Image (cartoon, rainbow, N blue to C red):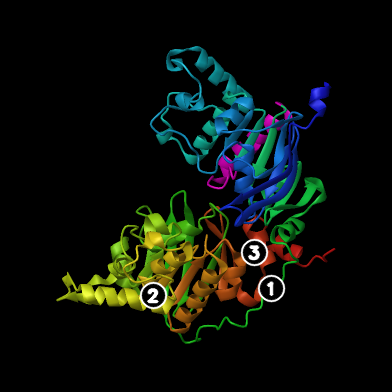
């Protein structure tokens, strides 16, 4: 073996990153060593610092401190292009391909010159397909490919640059099981046969255990665990990710709904091709049901299907004993309300004021003869929303773009509270907001359920689900893989179930003694 092969391909030494003049610290001195021929797993909860670290080592962000050592030499990359030229390729979670170009054009997109007419590129493409063990017709438009095929095109693209380190950010999150197996086989082939270094970022504990050679866990911007994968198990990974021995939370604040409460929502074999396997569910007035699952598990797809936002959905949604038509208009009229995960694009009108956003779903109630909105009444409703939800805004006339993330989220919820909502669907209602706003929103969920409203809440923070839910459904690969009553589960078990363990294996893991 040559001396150069004995030097780690990349070392991150004391890597630091802060934003807003040091007010927000994302990385607090991370050390990480990546070697050729190995798959290195990178894990951590949301906000642990994974994305920031990836952006630094791929040249998208400059580090605030520490250094990157590439093939034994300190480097400073000013752009992803520079890092890519040096041999680092990043396959992002949201695949940045050009849908109107062909597979071949996307694979060699970064090459200069009139290459589209150069037949040598087809030979290079054929060689890439043979190396990976997968072939996609080169003249097919990317827009016509499945998500899994697009992921493979991204891998071809990375290899086409001659990359020695391939960073894969949640590469299987949106893939079906057969597509995942293809990615797994490709990763193994690249590391074992081509001696590539792979940095594999994933939430799925089972695939990390099966695929990686070693791993690093980030928590609060620090590397809290470095280990050989063979020395670990799922329970120890879960404990390190969260940062404590996982136990059931204190649930004194969760009040069960009355036993005689009427059923307000019933799902009958609700399904969507390629997104959601058939699921049936009943929800009573005043009940809170949590949906636990990782990215790509089908949790958001379930809410969209319930709300009539998925035109391909089948099965029935029954509200108050009556099946409703498959449309968002019919859902709202029946008493369903959805607070979407992407509040800026789907939940708010950014150029509208607080009062105008608040009154949109139920204008007829504050309109003259249910036709012409009365500005004075709209303004009063905006003021009431600010008071009721403790929205920090100077007045109802403030634009929602001027509000903090937490206060903007409160507006997305407030707009549904002045109409006849029977079932509130919350998709990641506390994502990206501060702890104070999170507390306010979770308290509001309890208040609404106590007043008789049924709530379905999706959250990546399983601790939050345990704080407000009576029962929790665990989603994976578009299926409900487990249902747990509040008193019969813990954050530990939910993480294991969402990460791919069977209910029986997860239950056994939670009973192991801790060391």
Q: Earlier in the sequence, mark 2 or mark 1?
A: 1
Residue 191 percent across, percent down from the top left = 71, 32
Crowd class of label 2 (few under 14; some 14 to 19; many from 20; radius 10 Å): many
Q: Residue 499: image x %, image y %?
A: 65, 55
Is the C terminus in the top left, top right, bottom left or bottom right quadrant?
A: bottom right
Q: Secondary structure at mark 2?
A: helix
Q: Which residue is mark 2?
A: 386
Q: Is residue 137 above or below residue 43?
A: above
Q: Residue 297 falls in which quadrant of the image?
A: bottom right
Residue bearing the label numbered 1: 248
Which residue does the numbered mark 3 point to in the structure image? 494
Label 3 residue SS: helix
Q: Secondary structure at mark 1?
A: loop
Question: On the rendered structure, is 42 left or right of 453?
Answer: right
Looking at the image, residue 71 sits to the left or right of residue 289; the answer is: right
Separation of residues labelled 2 and 3 (CA atoms)? 35 Å
Magenta residue span: 169-194
| Residue situated in front as seen by the camera: 425 or 81 | 81
Of the numbered discs 3 and 1, the one sitting upstream in the chain is 1
């Amino acid at each position: 073996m040559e001396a150069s092969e004995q030097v780690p391909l990349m070392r991150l030494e004391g890597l630091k990153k802060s934003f807003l003049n040091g007010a927000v610290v994302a990385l607090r001195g991370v050390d990480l060593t990546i070697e050729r021929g190995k798959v290195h797993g990178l894990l951590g909860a949301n906000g642990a610092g994974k994305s920031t670290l990836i952006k630094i080592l791929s040249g998208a962000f400059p580090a605030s401190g520490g250094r990157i050592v590439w093939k034994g030499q300190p480097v400073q990359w000013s752009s992803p292009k520079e890092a890519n030229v040096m041999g680092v390729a990043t396959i992002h979670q949201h695949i940045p391909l050009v849908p109107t170009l062909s597979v071949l054009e996307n694979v060699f997109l970064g090459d200069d010159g009139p290459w589209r007419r150069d037949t040598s590129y087809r030979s290079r493409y054929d060689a890439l397909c043979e190396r990976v063990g997968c072939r996609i017709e080169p003249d097919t438009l990317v827009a016509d490919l499945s998500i899994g095929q697009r992921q493979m095109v991204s891998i071809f693209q990375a290899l086409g640059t001659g990359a020695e380190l391939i960073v894969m950010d949640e590469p299987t999150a949106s893939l079906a099981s057969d597509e995942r197996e293809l990615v797994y086989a490709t990763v193994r082939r690249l590391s074992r046969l081509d001696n590539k270094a792979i940095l594999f970022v994933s939430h799925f504990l089972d695939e990390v255990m099966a695929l990686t050679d070693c791993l690093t866990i980030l928590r609060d911007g620090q590397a809290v665990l470095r280990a050989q994968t063979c020395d670990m198990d799922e329970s120890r990974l879960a404990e390190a990710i969260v940062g404590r021995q996982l136990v059931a939370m204190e649930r004194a604040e969760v009040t069960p709904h009355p036993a005689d409460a009427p059923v307000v929502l019933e799902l009958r074999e609700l399904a969507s091709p390629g997104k959601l396997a058939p699921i049936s569910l009943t929800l009573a007035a005043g009940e809170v049901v949590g949906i636990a699952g990782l990215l790509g598990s089908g949790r958001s797809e379930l809410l969209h299907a319930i709300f009539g936002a998925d035109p391909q959905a089948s099965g029935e949604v029954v509200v108050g004993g009556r099946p409703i038509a498959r449309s968002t208009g019919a859902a709202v009229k029946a008493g369903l309300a959805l607070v979407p995960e992407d509040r800026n694009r789907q939940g708010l009108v950014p150029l509208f004021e607080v009062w105008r956003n608040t009154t949109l779903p139920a204008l007829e109630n504050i309109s003259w003869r249910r036709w012409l909105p009365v500005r004075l009444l709209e303004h009063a409703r905006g003021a009431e929303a600010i008071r009721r939800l403790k929205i920090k805004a100077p007045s109802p006339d403030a634009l929602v773009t001027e509000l903090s993330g937490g206060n903007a989220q409160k507006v997305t919820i407030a707009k549904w509270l002045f109409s006849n909502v029977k079932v509130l669907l919350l998709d990641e209602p506390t994502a990206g907001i501060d702890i104070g706003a999170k507390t306010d929103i979770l308290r509001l969920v309890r208040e609404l359920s106590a007043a008789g409203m049924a709530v379905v809440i999706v959250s990546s923070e399983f601790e939050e689900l345990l704080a407000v839910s009576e029962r929790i459904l665990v989603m994976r690969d578009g299926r409900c893989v487990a249902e747990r009553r509040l008193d019969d589960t813990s954050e530990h078990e939910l993480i294991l179930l969402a990460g791919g363990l069977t209910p029986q294996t997860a239950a056994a893991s939670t009973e192991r003694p801790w060391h």
